């Protein structure tokens, strides 16, 4: 083979290798959706790849390839950052990397976050930059999830502050309330029957109202305490239920309550809280019974995919569809205190306990026939 033929062969091979590299490069750019730019610095002309433009919603022909084109759609507050970084990159002869997170306006008006990495790849003899290559990667989703995470953290913090406030407020309110209650009782004891006009009745109103307020404040205090001692252990729900029923023995006998109880599982949870959950549901099932009928309460649990689903079913007055969600909110009651005594905290308690365990609580009901409360506890 002559030298010319040899050189020609080498040239062919180099050409093939170059084409191959170009194909790989194009494939990477296309499949990673990375945008690519090539800036001729002295002439201030710039190639912007179709993927660069696509990232901001433009077809290749819709956006010119020039420095002005991207400068028009970049978030204006981020533009000085680009020049500053470029200055530092050049000044340090490329030692300070040209890496930056920048915001752009998408054609549809939304915001696009990009990670931009650039590098001056050619310098003249005096050390002036001649050419810069760079890429853009869309990091909008990462930024969004970071923002959501921050938002959730802030919300959790606010929630903690609110809990603390409710705790302090309800705790500090107890003392003055106790004073009102004990002095009204003293006055009733000492002066009842000897006061003029309606003073007796008024005093009784004060006494009733302050006692009621005391129950509300106590309920609120208990609510803020749920889960304070976060000690998860194995809880035998069947045993817990038996304890609750024995505590409620007098009420159960008095109201002629019948129970139908399936076997219940052992779960991982907070013992005292689970006890309070059953206590609330069962006392409600007894309290909201139909007039002239004895309560029949059915309790059971079924194993589902990744949780236990418990149910407490009663044959009571039932709940209108419109109120099925509202009753779980704190202080929400469907009846006035003369009809059924209560504070409206019980079910809010139940919801907080179930959510603390990572579960859900809800109710299904037919007015006049009864209600079934469901809650799930993860396995
Ligand atoms: P409270 O019983 O102190 O009012 P809860 O938070 O336990 O507070 O319940 C909120 C409301 O939900 C009650 O006022 C009642 O109207 C309704 N409710 C709760 N349990 C039942 C039930 N088993 N049957 C019918 N209504 C119920």
Image (spheres, rainbow, N blue to C red):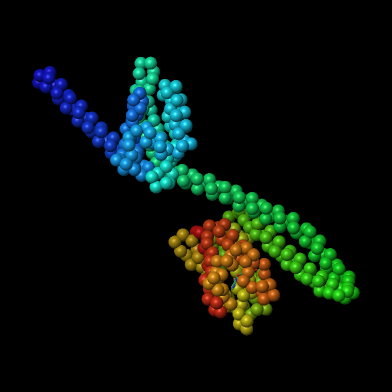
Which residue corresponds to the image point at 40% horizontal and 35% vertical from the top-left? Answer: 71
Residue 143 at what x, y percent from top left? 46, 43
Residue 253 in sight: no
Residue farthest to the top?
126
Residue farthest to the bottom?
292
Q: Nearer the viewer, residue 216 or 244?
A: 216
Residue 368 position by quadrant = bottom right
Residue 82 at what x, y percent from top left? 44, 31
Q: Nearer the viewer, residue 311 or 204?
A: 204
Residue 23 at what x, y percent from top left? 25, 36
Which residue corresponds to the image point at 60% horizontal and 52% vertical from the top-left? Answer: 159
- Image side of residue 115 versus residue 170, left or right: left
Q: Nearer the viewer, residue 79 or 120?
A: 79
Residue 123 position by quadrant = top left
Q: How many marks?
A: 0
- The N terminus is located in which quarter? top left
Residue 92 position by quadrant = top left
- Image side of residue 215 versus residue 63, left or right: right
Residue 328 in sight: yes
- Image side of residue 235 versus residue 113, left or right: right
Residue 160 at what x, y percent from top left? 62, 51
Which residue corresponds to the image point at 70% horizontal and 53% vertical from the top-left? Answer: 168
- Quarter of image, ligand 1: bottom right
The vertical placement of 340 against 234, above or below, is below
């Amino acid at each position: 083979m002559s030298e010319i033929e040899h050189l020609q062969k080498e040239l062919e091979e180099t050409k093939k290798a170059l084409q191959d590299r170009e194909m790989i490069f194009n494939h990477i750019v296309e499949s990673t959706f990375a945008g690519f730019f090539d800036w001729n610095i002295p002439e201030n002309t710039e190639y912007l790849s179709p993927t660069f433009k696509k990232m901001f919603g433009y077809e290749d022909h819709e956006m010119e390839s020039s420095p002005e084109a991207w400068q028009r759609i970049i978030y204006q507050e981020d533009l000085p950052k680009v020049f500053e970084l470029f200055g530092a990159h050049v000044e340090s002869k490329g030692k300070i990397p040209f890496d930056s997170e920048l915001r752009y306006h998408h054609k549809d008006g939304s915001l696009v976050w990009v990670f931009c990495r650039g590098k001056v790849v050619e310098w003249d003899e005096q050390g002036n930059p001649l050419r810069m290559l760079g890429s853009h990667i869309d990091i909008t989703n990462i930024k969004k999830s970071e923002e959501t995470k921050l938002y959730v953290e802030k919300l959790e913090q606010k929630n903690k502050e609110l809990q603390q406030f409710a705790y302090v407020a309800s705790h500090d309110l107890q003392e003055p309330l106790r004073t009102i209650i004990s002095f009204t009782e003293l006055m009733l004891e000492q002066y009842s029957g000897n006061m003029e006009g309606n003073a007796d009745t008024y005093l009784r109103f004060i006494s009733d109202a302050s006692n009621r307020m005391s129950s509300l404040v106590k309920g609120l205090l208990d609510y803020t305490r749920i889960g304070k001692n976060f000690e998860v252990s194995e809880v035998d729900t069947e045993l817990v239920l038996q304890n609750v029923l024995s505590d409620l023995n007098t009420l159960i006998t008095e109201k002629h309550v019948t129970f139908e109880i399936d076997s219940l599982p052992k779960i991982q949870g907070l013992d005292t809280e689970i006890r309070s959950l059953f206590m609330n549901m069962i006392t409600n099932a007894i309290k909201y019974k139909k007039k002239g009928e004895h309560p029949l309460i059915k309790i059971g649990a079924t194993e589902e995919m990744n949780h236990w689903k418990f149910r407490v079913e009663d044959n009571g007055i039932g709940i209108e569809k419109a109120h099925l969600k509202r009753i779980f909110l704190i202080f929400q009651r469907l009846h006035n205190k003369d009809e059924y005594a209560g504070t409206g905290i019980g079910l809010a308690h139940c919801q907080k306990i179930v959510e603390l365990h990572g579960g859900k609580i809800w109710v299904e009901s037919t007015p006049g026939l009864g209600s079934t409360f469901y809650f799930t506890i993860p396995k």
